[in-house]
Image: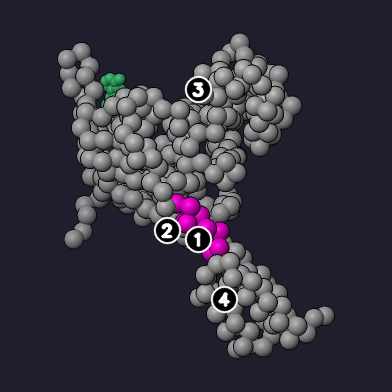
């Protein structure tokens, strides 16, 4: 049994070490205070404090990486021209996404969420305003993004591995390197498949995989060329609730490992809160961003986090915002 002096000494040593790499001073002083006040502190309390300290460090380090603006919308509007009719899809969008951020966008059907992603991918250009990636205006399709859709859209005649490798046959300058030496890319594709728990499925055809498995392959395909930005358009919308939750964890792992920026469009508010650092809500068409909520739940998040008070409070707060947007709730002044 260790003496309280010994525990106190060890904690002080650890705290000093932590202070030297991170300025979470408030929490460390709290730790000292508990030791001074109580003399002896219990192991569960030590673990609790150390866990909080660790979460704070991880969050602060992630914040530091979030400084660079990777996507910027400046007063963006978009009108589609359909058989002579003008369809006003987006209006006055101002949005900044920082490197490494995980952003979720939710809103009613037809409000312009997919349009927003297409603008980032450079598949369409704004009618007014500008969309910039890393400070440069987007003029056309960009290789800085990878995209996955609601349906996996795998090529049925290609095996799993070859579907993952597909972007490398298209995206320059990787295309030429890939044809010179395929080996490192094949290894990378295998590692990605392993991350999404699909090892051993390399040579299966898409029809031999379940819907959830196909969606995992499509996530790997979107990430194989190491895009700076991953765009996800309701990627889990067609899946059952259990598979969807399983894939939330897979996506969180991928995001934490690949350190890319993710913009996720979803109809599922729980999914948005579970996965994102920032949740945006859009109004009915023409879509505007009407609310922004920060999610401070520490990473890695677990499915149990969905039942915490913090999660539920945030869910109700955002649900309330959606109610206001839909005119179900009259806002109080
Ligand atoms: N190519 C197009 N030509 C004309 N109108 C379009 C085109 N694409 C989308 N629209 C219209 O623009 C509006 C926004 O479409 P968008 O697909 O961005 O909505 P969304 O929010 O993604 O909807 P959902 O949640 O149903 O996927 C809709 O009214 C849609 O009919
Ligand atoms: Mg859509």
Q: Which mark is residue 60?
A: 1
- The reply to whether callout 1 and callout 4 are in contact (CB within 8 Å) is no
Q: Quadrant of the C terminus?
A: bottom left
User: Which label's residue is closer to the chain start, 1 or 4?
Assistant: 4
Instruction: Tell me the residue at 61%/21% (across/down).
Output: 178
Viewer-nearest of labels 4 and 2? 4
Q: Is residue 283 visible?
A: no
Residue on which disc 2 sits: 313
User: Which label's residue is closer to the chain start, 2 or 3?
Assistant: 3
User: Which label's residue is closer to the chain start, 1 or 3?
Assistant: 1
Circle 4 residues within 10 Å: few <14, some 14–19, many ≥20: many
Estimate the x, y position of residue 31 in percent, counting from the top left.
59, 78
Look at the image and give the residue range highlighted in magenta. 56-66
Residue on which disc 3 sits: 172
Circle 3 residues within 10 Å: few <14, some 14–19, many ≥20: few
Q: Main secondary structure of the magenta part?
A: helix
Instruction: Tell me the residue at 57%/41% (across/down).
Output: 258
Estimate the x, y position of residue 34 in percent, counting from the top left.
60, 83
Circle 1 residues within 10 Å: few <14, some 14–19, many ≥20: some
Quadrant of residue 35 in the image? bottom right
Residue on which disc 4 sits: 28
The secondary structure type at the circle numbered 1 is helix
Instruction: Tell me the residue at 64%/33% (across/down).
Output: 192
């Amino acid at each position: 049994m260790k003496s309280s002096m010994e525990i106190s000494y060890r904690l002080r040593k650890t705290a000093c070490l932590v202070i030297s790499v991170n300025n979470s001073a408030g929490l460390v002083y709290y730790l000292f205070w508990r030791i001074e006040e109580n003399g002896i502190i219990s192991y569960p309390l030590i673990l609790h404090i150390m866990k909080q300290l660790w979460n704070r460090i991880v969050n602060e380090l992630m914040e530091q990486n979030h400084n660079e603006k990777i996507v910027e919308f400046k007063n963006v509007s978009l009108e589609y021209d359909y058989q002579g009719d003008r369809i006003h899809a987006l209006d006055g969008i101002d949005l900044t996404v920082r490197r490494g951020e995980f952003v979720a966008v939710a809103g009613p059907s037809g409000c312009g969420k997919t349009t927003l992603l297409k603008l980032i991918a450079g598949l369409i250009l704004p009618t007014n305003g500008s969309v910039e990636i890393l400070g440069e205006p987007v003029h056309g399709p960009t290789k800085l993004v990878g995209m996955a859709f609601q349906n996996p859209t795998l090529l049925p005649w290609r095996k799993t591995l070859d579907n993952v490798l597909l972007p490398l046959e298209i995206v320059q300058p990787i295309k030429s390197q890939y044809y010179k030496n395929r080996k490192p890319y094949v290894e990378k594709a295998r590692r990605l498949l392993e991350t999404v728990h699909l090892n051993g499925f390399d040579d299966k055809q898409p029809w031999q995989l379940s819907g959830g498995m196909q969606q995992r392959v499509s996530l790997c395909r979107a990430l194989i060329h190491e895009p700076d930005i991953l765009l996800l358009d309701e990627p889990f919308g067609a899946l059952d609730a259990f598979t969807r939750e399983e894939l939330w964890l897979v996506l969180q792992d991928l995001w934490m490992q690949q350190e890319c920026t993710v913009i996720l469009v979803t109809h599922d508010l729980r999914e948005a809160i579970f996965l994102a650092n920032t949740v945006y809500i859009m109004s009915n068409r023409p879509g505007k961003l009407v609310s922004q909520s920060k999610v401070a739940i520490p990473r890695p998040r677990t499915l149990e986090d969905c039942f915490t008070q913090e999660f539920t409070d945030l869910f109700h707060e955002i649900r309330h915002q959606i109610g206001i947007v839909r005119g179900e709730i009259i806002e109080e002044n």
